[in-house]
Image (tube, grey):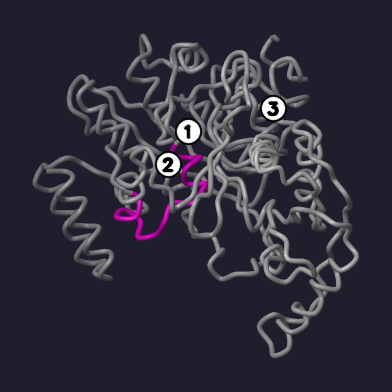
Amino acid sequence: MASQINNAIDQLLKRGLLNLALAVLASVTIFGSPHLSYAGGISTPKADALPEGTKLVPIMYLRELRKRPFPVSLLDIPPKNEGISGAHLAIDDNNTTGRFLKQSFSLEVFESKDQAEIVAEAKRLNDSGNSIFVVDVTAETLLKISDALKDKQVLILNAGAPDQRLREQDCRSNIKHTLPSRAMLTDALAQYLAWKRWRKLYIVTGPQSADKLYRQAFLRSAKRFGLKIVGENNFKYEVGSRRSDGGFEQVQKQIPSFTQNAKDHDVLIVIDEWGQFGDYFPYRTWKARPVAGTHGLYPTTWHPGVELWGATQFQNRFKRKWNRVMRPLDYNAWMAVRTIGEAATRSPSLDAKDLIAYIGSPKFSLAAFKGQKLNYRDWNGQLRQPIFLTTAKLHVTVSPQQGFLHQLTELDTLGIDKPETKCKGYGQ
């Protein structure tokens, strides 16, 4: 009954019939059907409206609204509900199983541009009895949240910050990471380039601090897998407006001249995390060479074209619900919320202490449409997972690549391995 009501409200909202949707919702409450709080296109049961004996597991979602430069392509403008949509889909998935176990999951979202506000809200929510947080914030904000709650029994699931230092020298035992680190991404790419024997690389790096961190990770990966950096250059975007006459002509002339004197190479590596110029390089370089890195062939945790391992139905469910494709941040948030759902079905109780202990134990595993069950590294809280290498429309391959072996699991060939780690927060 509840799902039928939710679908009816969704259809009314899609057709712009807001008043009629509100009337339907009001009638549901009056006539005694399941009491639902409607927000953001999803229905979440209230604690006081749950069936007798059902335990509510509240999950808090903290999002830092960050200002970034406008992307090169209109297709790359992020949706306003990016990440949150994936978390809501996972709430649906958790509740599908949870209703048989008398468990119910809810999501409360807090967004702000102000770091201090986000940290204060995390403390307020914890003081109100909330112990589980999914966060999409900067590395600096994540560390402040972690330290503010360090003496509490909490679990913070990082879905938005790829910084390696969060898994290394600045690791925290109350944080687990569902998105890959930059080292995992660059290792995935470097493995494939080594497998293809495309060993001579020329690197172009953008001006942002994130670009420099990605470059640092890639240099480590290149050395690790026997690739040779034949040269490097920094790119500063200085052309005229790309939307005015002459803008594209300037780019068409600039890129060939910029790469004309590059030493002979097999692949041009472009590093542009914010998408300010990277899409200009394919098909415009002086020599006919493939482009990889953050553009061209790029590593990612998820891609809307993936159909492997049952992903088609997963992609379709997301698109039916939100009328758009699933982006990597959506997937990272989905994995975070599903982590809680999976632990709740198998841990001794729904107390935060038991959930946290089970997630960190060897017994935990997460099915995430990647061909194998995933779990968290016990030395830095990073989720082990395969990485897709993709182009704009399709995935090309999946790393770890065949032949890259490990004494425990091939997934640990991606990222910093246990013997190398600088993380001390996990008692290693």
Establish if 365 lies above or below 65: above
Determine which residue is flagged by label 3. Answer: 167
Label 3 or label 1, whichever comes before in sequence order: 3
As shown in the figure, which amino acid type bears the numbered disc 2?
Ala
Q: Amino acid at mark 3?
A: Arg
Q: Residues within 10 Å of mark 3 (few under 14, many from 20)?
A: many
Placement of 73 over or under 82, stated as above or below: below
The percent coordinates of residue 98 (x first, y second) are 26, 27
Q: Is residue 43 visible?
A: yes
Amino acid type indicated by mark 1: Ala
Magenta residues, as a range? 318-334
N-terminal of the pair, mark 1 or mark 2, is 2
The residue under the point 58% across, 30% down is 177
Task: Give the left or right position of residue 16, taking residue 408 as reference.
Answer: left
Q: Which residue is mark 2?
A: 87
Quadrant of the rendered image containing residue 351: top left
Magenta region includes residue 333: yes
